[in-house]
Image (spheres, coloured by chain):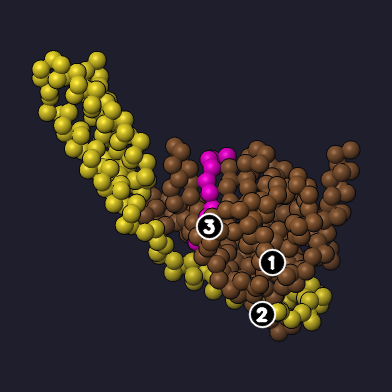
Chain colours: A yellow, B brown
């Protein structure tokens, strides 16, 4: 049972570390909670037997780092959009093409000729 | 019986409403979040923008909608989507529609040129490797594209509607007509990035599987003259998420 908890603690702490470095860092909290729970259980059982393996404090350390990184990203790194140049160029291109095409829609445009816009 | 009912509703749906809600230089910015294991992750920025477009004969309104993934996602799944519709600024009747989709390695462009006299739409679909497909499709009276439909929803007078009352709109998407139902669910006050707002709560449904279930897709429109979308909850075949307003400028009222 103790070995099972150690294995689960290691897996979930590694998972939380992976999530923390990915854009889905918010999700790191789920495996982190599981990692703490498994690590605590493994630590408690190991202490009862009188021998705590070094891997258990390591999982605590790794999970704490993952949680701190996740928290840092949530608080200090703002979501922003970049690399929009091609989209902006497309917007201009489509507008120019649209104006040319709308000029040709004589019959369709008749009904809206006198429209003015309230600014 | 059902078909007759729909036809009656549709007949009543010929929009006589005039635009008193949408400004000519309006910009609304939203954050789209996707639900992963119960935790919302900000995925993309969605912008709805209007601007005047002058031709030698008239001034039209350009309704533009863009969706851009946040930079942290760009290395995994980059989205640069553009939807636009050139409409009559008073009635929002569309004349031209463009859709340009760039999602990862997927590319698709679609252009509709409306002919309201013949109730047809000339469509041009372009896929990767310049694979072009032309097709003319027949549409019903009052059928609009997705962008002008989104804005048309802001022209309705929700104050005169009863809770549970439904309106049906027909829109053309991927060259097929889809019926969308808007159900008025009443007023609700919600907190948003632009302040606490009293809103009209609407449920959106469709005749296809695009929007799943009843009342799973909800929109909150401010219960003022601008009727801007401030919050949305959606459920699609691949999951669910939210749309939250970040900023609003150039409002008409």
Q: Nearer the viewer, mark 2 or mark 1?
A: 1
- Asked whether disc 2 touches disc 1, contact meaning CB atoms under 8 Å apart, the reply is no
In this view, B142 is above or below A23: below
Task: State the mark number for residue A119.
Answer: 2
User: Which residue is nearer to you in this view: B201 or B195?
Assistant: B195
Q: Which residues lie in the magenta part?
A: B237-246
User: Which residue is nearer to you in this view: B134 or B198?
Assistant: B198
Quarter holding the N terminus of chain A?
top left
Task: State the mark number for residue B131.
Answer: none
Please state the horizontal and vertical placement of residue A114, each as a whole percent of the image: 79, 82
Q: Secondary structure at mark 3?
A: strand
User: Which residue is the extreme one toward the bottom?
Assistant: B56
Q: Secondary structure at mark 2?
A: loop
User: Which residue is nearer to you in this view: A65 or B5?
Assistant: A65
Please state the horizontal and vertical placement of residue A36, each as a whole percent of the image: 26, 31
In this view, B27 is above or below B201: below
């Amino acid at each position: 049972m103790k070995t099972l908890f150690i294995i689960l603690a290691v897996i979930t702490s590694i998972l939380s570390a992976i999530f923390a470095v990915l854009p889905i860092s918010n999700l790191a909290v789920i495996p982190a909670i599981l990692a703490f729970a498994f690590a605590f259980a493994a630590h408690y059982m190991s202490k009862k037997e009188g021998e705590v393996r070094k891997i258990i404090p390591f999982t605590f350390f790794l999970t704490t780092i993952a949680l701190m990184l996740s928290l840092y990203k949530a608080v200090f790194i703002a979501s922003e959009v970049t690399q929009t140049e091609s989209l902006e160029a497309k917007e201009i291109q489509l507008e120019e093409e649209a104006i040319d095409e709308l000029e040709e829609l004589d019959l369709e445009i008749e009904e809206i000729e006198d429209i003015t816009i309230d600014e | 019986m059902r078909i007759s009912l729909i036809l009656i509703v549709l007949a009543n749906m010929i929009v006589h409403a005039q635009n008193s809600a949408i400004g000519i230089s309006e910009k609304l910015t939203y954050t789209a979040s996707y639900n992963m294991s119960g935790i919302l992750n900000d995925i993309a920025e969605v912008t709805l923008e209007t601007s005047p477009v002058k031709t030698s004969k008239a001034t039209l309104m350009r309704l533009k909608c863009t969706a851009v993934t946040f930079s942290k996602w760009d290395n995994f799944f980059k989205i640069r989507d553009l939807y636009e519709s050139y409409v009559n600024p008073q009635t929002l009747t569309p004349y031209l529609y463009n859709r340009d989709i760039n999602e990862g390695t997927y590319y698709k462009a679609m252009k509709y040129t409306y002919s309201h006299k013949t109730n047809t739409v000339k469509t041009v679909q372009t896929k990767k490797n310049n694979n072009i497909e032309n097709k003319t499709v027949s549409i019903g009276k009052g059928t609009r594209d997705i962008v002008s439909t989104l804005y048309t929803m802001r022209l309705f007078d929700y104050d005169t509607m009863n809770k549970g009352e439904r309106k049906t709109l027909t829109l053309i998407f991927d060259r097929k007509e889809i019926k969308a139902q808007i159900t008025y669910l009443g007023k609700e006050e919600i907190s948003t990035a632009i302040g606490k707002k009293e809103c009209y709560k609407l449920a959106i449904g469709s005749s296809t599987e695009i929007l799943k279930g009843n009342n799973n897709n909800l929109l909150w429109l401010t219960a003022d003259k601008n009727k801007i979308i401030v919050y949305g909850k959606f459920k699609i075949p691949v999951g669910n998420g939210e749309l939250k307003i970040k900023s609003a400028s150039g409002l008409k009222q």
